[in-house]
Image: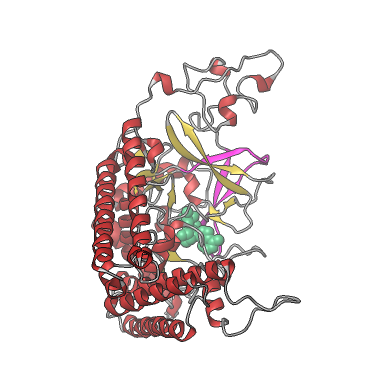
Amino acid sequence: MKRKSAREVRSIRRHATRTRSWTKKGLRSKRVAKIKGNIVSSPSEQVSASDSQLLYTHIECNEFIHRGHKQLVDDDIPVCSCKLVKGDSESACGDRCLNFLTSNECTPGFCPCGETCKNQRFQQRRYINSKLVKTEERGWGLLAAQDVKMGEFVIEYCGEVISCEEARTRSQTYEVEGLQDAYIISLSGSEFIDATRKGSLGRFINHSCDPNCETRKWTVLGEVRVGIFAKKDIKAGTELTYNYNFEWYGGAKVRCRCGATSCVGFLGAKSRGFQEDTYVWDDNDDRFSVENVPLYDSEDDEPLSSFFKKAQGRGEPKKTAGSTPPQSGVEDNAESLLLMHAIKLEVTTVDVKDNETSDNAMAELIVQQEVAIRHGDKPIKEDRLDGIIDLVDEKISKGERTEERDAKRKKQGALSLKRVRAEKLGLLHKRARLYTNQYSNTVLSSHVKAHSISKYVSSERSLEALLAAEEAETAASLELSRLHDKLRPTMEDLGKDGPDSLPVTAAEEWIALTCKQMAAVFNFNFTAIRSLPCFSPDTQQT
Ligand SMILES: C[S@@+](CC[C@H](N)C(=O)[O-])C[C@H]1O[C@@H](n2cnc3c(N)ncnc32)[C@H](O)[C@@H]1O
């Protein structure tokens, strides 16, 4: 008997893992039966029920897992003013229909064009003919089985509608189960569609960096739905593709095999999931290869890199044609404040255990910075800055050493994939969260603590004022976060983040508390600056 290659052995093992995981849940036979049913109606003859990637339940309408379908209220139904004109096919809700233009589908029973309305493509499942094919490196894919015109509706991406938390949990579970194909995409700020267990043929559309389709969100009977639409004319027999960026919630960094000259290298590299929660598939995986990629596409995308470049090159004078570089002034001060902010973030992000040291160092530096700026001096003392940068560098290299150690452990099989992710990419993960969570207060809130700068404060009166301002800031932040907690379920039910999705009174309360919290933060910072020796009211009086 021919000896199996390492690649074949791995592939068999992986297949076995997947099969086991379904079997464990007692779902396998049920799923296979469902698939068999699908194959008959599916356009593909090449599908085999034994293919593990096809073990899913075919659905043609989203299923809501964490809430029910929104109830339609008559007043909220968008009604167009189209009229059917004989001989004008576009008159019955064509591309001049107000609903069509605003990505709303007409509601049966309310549309003036009745049964002739053409703006109900999701509801009537007006999909193009398509065909499943097995690709060489990207698993299954979907081909257009007819010519498709630019803008045409291809298919709906259906699946289970789940919350953010559920998306995260499921994505981790799939990872542990060994599923390498990711089917979770973003639906709204707080909801996702998971087509892993249940979905339409849309789940088989692969990614391309130069795609012929795109996703568009439409509101249908009060719910947002995701459709795949042709971006250009597509010839029958061409594989359908769209760009997963922004929509995809794949945890893994998966090497892109789209073959486009403009290929960015990885799937969903700009997606929320990629930036929030990233790990890399095993080295020995034969379909996807590991690469140590930066969190951002290029160094220019990295929010801090330009600041650090400036910090590193700050010894060299700026070369401005015909002029000597200014030593101080508004621009320089603004620049150095930004630099400070960058360092503050970096210290806060990298430093997990050694808060105290970096907090104090930072507080000291901030005070010096402020004093220098007010006096019009060169804003940052370079040796102090060097010290902080060294501190940051040291912490980063500490993190890198941890990474190396984890990689070794992983090879020995000592760590589970989940733990590797948590530990190995902990640093990047934390940093990514700072930039991607738009509601995070981490970046906005003050990192200067009253007690850290108390030794610089000019008088007891100033210190009292500072402590009172800090207390007010803490109270305002607490009040706001309590309100967030109270409103979160309502927002999740409505499927939207932000005050615009709330009843007016709640939105007003939200805005008022947000303003109050921002005012308190401002007041604290202002009080801190005023309490410095050169600016304190006490100094001015003398
Ligand atoms: C939504 S599924 C697409 C259907 C999938 N090919 C299948 O067999 O079920 C997404 C997964 O397909 C694979 N994939 C899609 N596009 C790819 C690409 N351009 N390069 C590499 N893998 C791709 C990845 O495994 C990804 O997680």
Residue 68 lies, in percent from the top left, at 31, 34
**Which quarter of the rendering shows the C terminus?**
bottom left
**Which quarter of the rendering shows the N terminus?**
bottom left
- Quadrant of residue 525 within the rendered picture: bottom left
- Quadrant of residue 63 within the rendered picture: top left
Residue furthest to the top: 86
Q: Is residue 148 magenta?
A: yes
Residue 355 lies, in percent from the top left, at 29, 75
Residue 17 to residue 481: above or below: below
Q: Residue at x 61, y 24 (%)?
A: 97
- Quadrant of residue 385 within the rendered picture: bottom left
The span picked out in magenta is: 128-157
531 or 317, which lies in front?
531
Q: Is residue 320 magenta?
A: no
Mark yes or no: residue 287 visible.
no
Q: Residue at x 36, y 71 (%)?
A: 533
Q: In screen coordinates, is 137 left or right of 6?
A: right
Mark yes or no: residue 462 visible.
yes
Q: Residue at x 41, y 54 (%)?
A: 438
Q: In screen coordinates, is 90 left or right of 18?
A: right
54 or 121, which lies in front?
121
Residue 316 to residue 170: above or below: below
523 or 140, which lies in front?
523
Q: In screen coordinates, is 203 left or right of 467?
A: right
Residue 334 lies, in percent from the top left, at 53, 66
Asked which colour scheme the image uses, the reply is secondary structure
Residue 409 lies, in percent from the top left, at 31, 83
- Count of marks placed on residues: 0
Residue furthest to the right: 322
